[in-house]
Image (cartoon, rainbow, N blue to C red):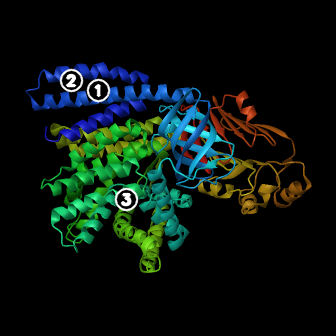
Amino acid sequence: MKRPLFDVGIAVLLGSAVVLYGNIYCYLLLPMLLAAAMICAGRAANPRWRKAAVCALSAAASILLMLSVSLSLESELKPLDGKTAEVTGVVTEKKSGNLHEAYGSVSTEAGSAEHIKFTLWNALSDELEAGDSFRCTARVTYDDPYTSEYRSSAGESRFLFCATGEEIELLDKSLYPVRAVTARLRAETSDRLIHALGAETGNLFSAITTGLRPGFDDSVQMMKDAGVYHVLAISGLHIAVFCHLILALTRVLPLRRRLRNSLALLCLWCPVLLSGGNHAVLRAAVMYSVLLFGRVIGRKADSLNSLGLAVILLILMDPFAVLSYGFLLSVLATLGILLYERPFAEFLKSHLPAQLTGRVGSSPVHLLACAIAAQCLTLPILADMDSLLVLNGIVAGMLILPMMTPMLLLGYLLIPALWLFPEGAGLLVLPARLLGSLFLRIAGWFSGLPFIFPLDTPVSRTVVLLMTLLLVVITALPAARRFFRPAMLAGASICCLLIAWEQWELAGSVQVISRGEDLMLLQDGHAVVLLADRDSEMLEELRRNGAEQIDLLIVESYAPLQAEGTLELLREYPPLQIAAPDSGAVTSYLEAVCDAPITSREQIEAVLPGDLQLRYQRGMGVEVSCGDILLLKFQDVYDIIKQYEPDVLLLPEQKAQVYRAGGIRVRENTAERTELLFWT
């Protein structure tokens, strides 16, 4: 076996993924893998059979590990579900609103859990800051690792959700001083960057150095549309730039090469602590640690073996790491670059004009090949995350990726300058602002390109998965490599045909968009709009999604009529029918702007095209039936939810709760905006 660690690491990754993303019956693979290992071991004289035996045993070991960890987790945390507990810990990261990530202990009469990560929600205030130690009484909810809510998270293993409506006691002495100091240092560094560089640029530099982006939500969608959202995730590029920065700074010291590499190996873990130690940065840190350690002992490290070792160590540290999209994207993108960057570059050089592939054009060709290679294996994950195939990033990466190196250098130099020499840091602030502003402008321009294709049906996602499997098979089997070009061209052609077929297939689907208390149903350009939010942004949604007219407009009160853009919405999309409260101010306003008939009933029932049924009750919310799919959107009425068994539940300022998968596709689901697609 030329690369035993790589083979074992990939086998462990696949075994864990099959179990976690499958169901309980996947554990039946264990005896099958053990039998396959025994059969292959009987032919161990052949290197290929020996390699197959090791891989089968590694996959079986990963399944055994998942089985033991799941049983241990279930026995430890399941008794805490629904109980009132005394929670003690330290805030490791402050999320949006009153939500906090914490580390500590949870104790109830039924049992306790020590030294665990959990999520804390405080209903009274958001007075807690990163690094604060606390004690409180909270109600505990246990989230099973196999639930869809956890799978959609890109975070780490947090299975306990603690909600409290009581005062939280702040502790003077921390029970976890190292975590408290690290969290406080990380949050303070982010605040200093934002204060020095301004809100927009400061949040960008905070995101790429500390992983915190408290005010960057408005630019996140732009980065996703541009296909460069991955640059915000601290991973290999960030660790590589920091490592080379340390090596460059140590060259001025009278040290030997091995001592410089040893010093860089120690300093390498500083950005890991600064970024909170997520899976992606840990993977990169392990790989570069192996590389530097090889230099120290005078041995050359193998990149694929280093990747396999990183996968093995991270899964041993956190067996549920495979559920993290960040971990999967980091591993698969790195694997794609290592395997396909050079073949793609040679393919481009052989098919592009010589003027474009000469000495000047060699770097852009390698950047384009690197961007394509990084997305080859990550397409199935990206399609499952956002239900979109974003090809803008292939071109955008040629400009964005070269900018990341100077931005990271400025960021890592600016952080110690802001702490040690805040007055002299101005020399770095100006170029950082200019480079950050240019970065955001370029990303904004590329986000407007039309190379974004929705992947909303199982068929389209299966096509992407099959294309990825085809690429893996062709590169894994030597006999199939001669068919690489015709197979890939045929696969790309089939992909384009199926994407076009999907657009035709989804022509009658229902698009559901929720923003705050507002709701929009869109089908074939015809919209039904509920205006209830004082800060309504429905005009932007109508334009963005290509609405042609509003068949029914429901106005909850006078508040949304005061929102900026409501008057323009009524004039640009004059509704055919309006339902509004029997109020003089509301009726006078609508009659002055619109010619549509106005009804003032408290309850409305409407049958819309496509067998879409809508029921609205003023002050309570909306019930939408689309075939056998039931959607509820309520204002502040929580008790009545128990009377229904909705497939989708929308509540203001909360993520949507989706209880079924068939016929529903989640395009976006945040506390600010939810976009769903129903098809029958």
**Disc 3 and disc 1: Cα gap in Å?**
35 Å
- The residue wearing badge 3 is 271
* Left or right of 596, for residue 355: left
Residue 161, by quadrant, is top right
Q: Secondary structure at mark 1?
A: helix
Q: Nearer the viewer, mark 3 or mark 1?
A: 3
**Disc 3 and disc 2: Cα gap in Å?**
41 Å
Q: Secondary structure at mark 3?
A: helix
> Is there CB contact under 8 Å for labels 3 and 2?
no
- The residue wearing badge 1 is 60
**Disc 1 and disc 2: Cα gap in Å?**
9 Å
- The answer to whether residue 579 shows anywhere in this view is yes
Q: Amino acid at mark 3?
A: Pro
Question: Who comes first in sequence, dot 1 or dot 2?
Answer: 2
Relative depth, front residue between 507 and 445: 445
Q: Amino acid at mark 2?
A: Ala
Question: Who comes first in sequence, dot 3 or dot 2?
Answer: 2
Mark 1, other Cα within 10 Å: few <14 / some 14–19 / many ≥20? many
> Is there CB contact under 8 Å for labels 3 and 1?
no
Name the residue: 25% across, 62% down.
263
